[in-house]
Amino acid sequence: MDDAQLPLSEREREVLALVATGLSNQEIARELVISVNTVKVHMRSIFEKLGVQSRTEATLVAIRMGLVTIPGTEVTLMHPLPAVEERPRERVAVLPVIRPVTLWQRLFALVAILLVIVLVVLPATEAGRPEVEIANPVSDRPETSASLLTAFTSRWVEHADLPLARTRLGLAAYGGALYAIGGHSEDGVTAQVDMYIPGRDTWIPRARKLTPVSNIGAIAIGDLIYVPGGCDASEAALDKLEVYNPKTDTWTEAASLPVAVCGYALATSNERLYVIGGWDGTRFVPTVQEYDSAQDTWILRTELPYALGFAVAGMIGDTIYVAGGYDGTREIAETLAYDPQRDRWSPRTPMKVGRAGAGGAVVGAELYVIGGGWLGSVVTNEKYNPETDTWSPFETPVLGQWRNLGVAALDAEVYAVGGWNGSYMRINRSYRALFRIILPVIQ
């Protein structure tokens, strides 16, 4: 990246380069001959400009910007710091000072090395990923050596594990609870439904879905949760629309989809359901299917500009945003905006990394995209601000591959449940997207 493109000042780049070496604020202050408070001011500015919330994320961005490289285990500054102006001083004999390497610096260096391994050996950028056709995009094969690589995160909270480890599930929020529906487990495609109550940190079994399915989405409209399509145990795409009533704990079947699909993106607007793209059993399709929940009817709308599956969708204002996905050869980074009133698609700024099988949810006026990593690995998540048409990274609790998980927003938190990381996952984490500040009223 050219210096002119960097959002940071020269001094901020110097501070960021030193952060990437694992130095503390006090050590940076000594190195640059500035006060610790000045370092803190620069750090706040760096975090705000880069959209990061931790020193680890800042290090990752520094590596991506080319401010530092880490050949092996040695950090090299790509933008050397300017020499400090020499002041006249008395000639004195100076003995070399060897500073001991602190535990914090060792841990920081280890994290940096892991990031480089992920970025170089397993490239996370769209350009670095090969265009490869996955033999079976609707099913996974467990890896005996699979392990969960987690990262220290400040805004992610760990909760009670999902009762049944599974991937390719639907996750919906309703009435202050989460509903994990269907998916693919070690025993195959399942109809299991589990309700999570955050206040109790407890999962409760609910009525099983009428049809076991995987590669699905789930979304609430009014007092009902809708689960369209999906793939059955034979990996055939279905045209069923099954509806769950949380109040009565019962399932019913509604009007069938015009096109049978699984692995689609799902969004809702004005009590209408939008099933976007997906896999029809033989190929990825660009179809957009709109369901009127009041009339129990379907219509086909203007197709996507290209066929895709396993993308993320979310409604912000009057627009549905679709990000990422897989088209049979590559993980997509592009973002599209759909205007339901005009039935028209238009491009938006792409994500920083191509993501397929990610999960997404809207909190406030931003779309949070979590996970992905189908052909490669990811080390951050991303959020989209439609007002500025920009993407910014935020921390992830799982490094590497984390795809086909369930993601839903509950109040000001984004929950990420289950998924695939080389094996079926039971993970249940929440990310605090917004904070409430209560100010006392002075009479």
Image: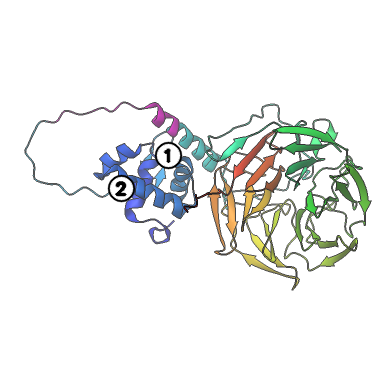
Residue range highlighted in magenta: 94-108
Image quadrant containing the N terminus: bottom left
- State the image coordinates of residue 51 (x, y, percent, origin top left): 49, 52
Name the residue nearer the viewer: 243 or 152: 243
Provide the major secondary structure of the magenta segment.
loop
* Mark 2: secondary structure: helix
- State the image coordinates of residue 30 (x, y, percent, origin top left): 26, 39
Q: Amino acid at mark 1?
A: Ile
Examine the structure image and report whether residue 226 is included in the region drawn in magenta: no
Residue 238 bears which disc, if any? none
Q: Residue at x 53, y 34 (%)?
A: 152
Which of the two labelled residues, at mark 2 and mark 1, occupies the earlier sequence position?
Answer: 2
Q: Residue at x 39, y 61 (%)?
A: 4
- Per the image, the residue denoted by label 2 is 38
Name the residue nearer the viewer: 109 or 438: 438
Name the residue nearer the viewer: 78 or 208: 208
Q: Residue at x 61, y 64 (%)?
A: 348
Examine the structure image and report whether residue 98 is included in the region drawn in magenta: yes
Q: Amino acid at mark 2?
A: Thr
- State the image coordinates of residue 3 (x, y, percent, origin top left): 38, 58
Q: Residue at x 26, y 27 (%)?
A: 98
- Per the image, the residue denoted by label 1 is 70
User: In the visual, does 36 lie left or right of 425?
Assistant: left
